[in-house]
Image (cartoon, rainbow, N blue to C red):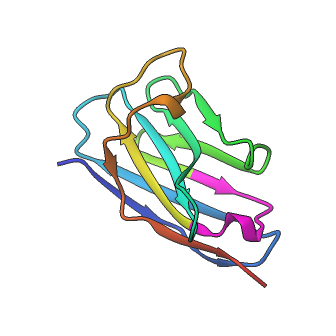
Amino acid sequence: QVQLVESGGGLVQPGGSLRLSCAASGIPSDYYGIGWFRQAPGKEREGVSCIVISDGSTDYADSVKGRFSISRDNAKNVVYLQMNDLTSDDTAVYHCATALGIFYGRSCFTYEYDYWGQGTQVTVSS
C-alpha cells in the first residue's frame, strides 16, 4: 500500500544543482519520517538527510551540510531534496524511504525506515 516514487535525478556538472522529489502515497499515519539515502558503487548506504513530516524537524549528514536542503510540501505529500554545489563524491543512487515509527527529540536518522522507493541516479561529472 505504501508507495514512494522518486524523480529528479540525472547528469549534472560539478558545482551544479539538482532537486530530487519523493512522492508518497498510502501512508497510514500523519506522523512519519522521510529519509534520503544514497549508495555509491563499492560503498555502504549513507543517510543523506531526513525530515519528520509532522513537525518539520530535519537532519543532515556532515558531508552535505550547507549544500543540501530537505523540505516538504504536505499538501502534495512530496518531500524534496535540493542539492547544490554538487561534486563527484555525490554521485550515487538516491533512495527515499519512510519511517512509520518516529521519536520526537531524536534525530530522524535513528528511525527505522520501513518502505523504500526505487531510487534515482545522480551522476556528477564534467
In this rendering, would 122 be left or right of 76? right
The x, y position of residue 51, in whole percent, is 53, 35
The x, y position of residue 24, in whole percent, is 34, 49
The x, y position of residue 2, in whole percent, is 23, 47
Q: Quadrant of residue 87?
A: bottom right
In the rendered view of the protein, which quadrant contains the C terminus?
bottom right
In this rendering, would 65 be left or right of 105? right
**The magenta stretch spans which residues?**
81-92
- Asked if residue 74 is positioned above or below residue 10 in the image, the reply reads above
The x, y position of residue 83, in whole percent, is 69, 57
Asked if the magenta segment contains residue 39, the reply would be no
Q: Quadrant of residue 4?
A: bottom left
Q: Is residue 76 visible?
A: no
- Asked if residue 26 is positioned above or below residue 42 in the image, the reply reads above
Q: Quadrant of residue 114?
A: top left
Q: Which residue is rendered at x = 75% and y = 59% of the image?
A: 84
Nearer to us in this view, 40 or 68: 40
Q: Which residue is rendered at x = 52% and y = 49% of the image?
A: 36
In this rendering, would 26 be left or right of 38? left
Q: Which residue is rendered at x = 48% and y = 16% of the image?
A: 104
